[in-house]
Image (tube, rainbow, N blue to C red):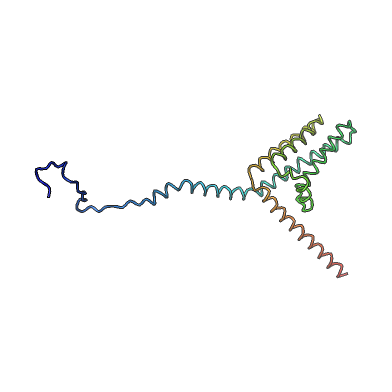
Amino acid sequence: MADPNTPSWLSPETPASPPTGMVPVEIDSSGVNAAAASPSTNAAEASAVGDAADEADLPGVILMMRLANMAAAGVLIAVSIWLMTTIPSISAFVLAFYATCGGILICCLETQLKFLRVVIAVNFGFLFHSVWRFFFYFLLASVAWSYDHLFGKIAAGGMGAAAVFNTYVLCRYPSYRKMRDKIAEEEDKRIEARISKEVRRQAASHLTK
């Protein structure tokens, strides 16, 4: 028992009991942990939503890019062939012939025919790389610019715009090649189904005769 004459600061401390009628409350830290972890979770969910949106937009972007590439290549081919028919100098003829071949290569790439796609992938793989494709398109644009007439400038502007757009798409959508191959496979299936249908129709017409 403590001495009543002993100062209070020398007496042993006893844990204070809660006042009557008050119930101790336990603090749940799970909510705090969940709140602390929510920013990273929200960021992951936002990234997944963004990737899904990119995947949904990619087929339309690929179609737009294919049409733009074929239009620019078509203008380049037409201008180059026109220049060759005017009997220019040997150097201008060689440049025009090179530009024509480059435009045909782009058209063959965008047609997505299976046998052409395999050959281009094996021998012209640089067209699937954003930087090398940009340099190739820019080279064709510079060749068209060297024609030194209005149509050459128009072809050069089209190829330059296509180079920038292609580079943006290849950098913005890393899954471009996978989606492009998927679209190409679907087109191959549609073409094969159409061919088989035509073959069956012709065979049926021969049998009826």
Q: Nearer the viewer, residue 102 or 131?
A: 131
Q: Position of residue 106 (x, y in %)?
A: 77, 43
Which quadrant, please, contains the C terminus? bottom right
Q: Position of residue 83 (x, y in %)?
A: 86, 34
Q: Position of residue 32 (x, y in %)?
A: 39, 48
Q: Is residue 158 visible?
A: no
Q: Would residue 42 appear left or right of 91 to someone viewing this image?
A: left
Name which residue lies at 65% across and 42% down. Answer: 171
Q: Would residue 9 appear left or right of 32 to someone viewing this image?
A: left
Q: Nearer the viewer, residue 56 or 177?
A: 177
Locate residue 152: give its quadrant.
top right
- The residue lying furthest to the right in this view is 87
**Above or below, 27 relative to 136:** below
Q: Position of residue 200 (x, y in %)?
A: 81, 65
**Above or below, 16 relative to 93:** below
**Above or below, 199 relative to 171:** below
Name which residue lies at 68% across and 40% down. Answer: 167
Q: How many marks?
A: 0
Q: Is residue 146 visible?
A: yes
- The residue lying furthest to the left in this view is 5
Q: Nearer the viewer, residue 51 or 9?
A: 9
Q: Nearer the viewer, residue 154 or 84?
A: 84
Name which residue lies at 59% across and 49% down. Answer: 53
- The residue lying furthest to the top in this view is 148
- The residue lying furthest to the bottom in this view is 208
